[in-house]
Amino acid sequence: MKLIPSPFAPAHFPDLPIVHGVRAATGSRGFYAARGLTRDDVFLFAFDEGTSCAGVYTVSNTASADVLWCREALKSGAGTASALVVNSGNSNAFTGPKGVLKNDATLKAMGDALGVAKETCFIAATGVIGEPLADPNYVGSIVPELAARLAAPDWEAAARAFMTTDTFPKGAGRSFDLDGTQINIAGIAKGSGMIAPNMATMLSYVFTDAAIAPALLQELLEDITDETFNSITVDGDTSTSDTLMVFATGACGMSPITSSDDPRFEVLADALHAVCLELAHLIVKDGEGASKFVTITVKGAVSSQSAKIMACEIANSPLIKTAMAAGDANWGRVVMAVGKSLEPIRMDELSIWFDDVLVAQNGSRAPDYSEAAASAVFAKPEFTITVDAGVGDQSHTVWTCDLTHGYVDINGAYRT
């Protein structure tokens, strides 16, 4: 399957900062050899002692064995982390007892190679669902080699190693001053299809040398996720493997942030939010077959959750997404999507904009509606759809892409 690069692919991978207390290595276990590809498909990260971690995972009832382990480890390890291993090419989802054996072997290899406790080790896998590995130690067998090569992370190499149908590696980072101490953040993500995060196939890992208590980091990550990764959608499908984790090593030398009342907390929170939002946008911009990146904002709703439901109905509608692909400014389909959400609205006050072009006002077509102006917006590679529900003062924004023939081509050939 030959993938066509996304029109939104950056010219180059970003220059991400060094995050102190983090080492990494990538390698090839041969997951893609049968397809005639030679590429890295596994990475190992190791963290300084005392690293805090937080995670959010898919709520799917068919979550992968890796996700189930990470949920358990996050609790049993009290939010501390020593190592992370991730592979692409096989999701280890719906693999029954064999999936657990694969995890046990990988975790043992991590513990033996690094001398760390099992409950501080995290794992993930992405790829085809329902194909158990014949050898439980298939991934674990490469861990000693990776452990021997640990060094300052090559962020691009790691970002490429867990790509599946992605057409470009995704990374984002920040460096900033926090009360006299330089803080560094670097994040990588993968995802292109099966994207409708509900926690977001999507995996993302963010690393910082800031110091923050695990419980506070977990609370912060959950808040950030709702406004970033849980507000994107490519095709409305939620993966079995969705994982977002943040690792905070504390190696910058600052005293730990232990309360949200600490004035440093909001500065760190804003930086983490910015990195997560950038990574989330990159996933949508690499949506399978995507040619448009679309922001959808619903305002005037009774609650932010109600606004989000309406925005997602618009974002996930095949009728609207194919109209986006064709440049057809069919605003009636937006009306349809808002209505089928069954969320509270005042129909005689409902208004719709495409960018700053008012297409519907107070429950009917806008008096000065211009088909040419609306179509010009839909012809752009990036634009915004805004809806005012007319019943309140709450809002929410989600991001999506169009639905093209490319999506069908990619998914029709995914296993070949």
Image: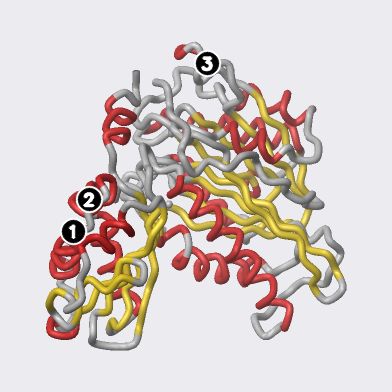
- Whether tag 1 and tag 2 are in contact, CB under 8 A, the answer is yes
Secondary structure at numbered mark 3: loop
**Of 268 and 81, the residue lying toward us:** 268
**Colour style of the rendered protein structure:** secondary structure
In the displayed structure, 289 sits above or below 238; it is above
Q: Residue at 57% of width from left, 70% of height from top?
A: 220
Mark pair 2, 3: CA separation: 36 Å
Looking at this view, name the residue that lies furthest to the bottom: 392
Secondary structure at numbered mark 1: loop
Q: Amino acid under label 2?
A: Ala
Residue 157 visible in rendering: yes
Which residue is denoted by mark 3 in the rendering?
37
| Image location of residue 414, percent across then percent down | 34, 26
On-image quarter of the C terminus: top left
Question: Which mark is nearer the camera, 2 or 3?
Answer: 2
| Image location of residue 210, percent across then percent down | 75, 64
Q: Amino acid under label 1?
A: Asn
Mark nearer the N terminus (3 vs 1): 3
**Of 48 and 222, the residue lying toward us:** 222
Which residue is denoted by mark 1 in the rendering?
330
Q: Amino acid under label 3?
A: Leu
Left or right of 43 on screen, residue 335: left
In the displayed structure, 206 sits above or below 214; it is above
Which residue is denoted by mark 2 in the rendering?
323
**Of 113 and 188, the residue lying toward us:** 188
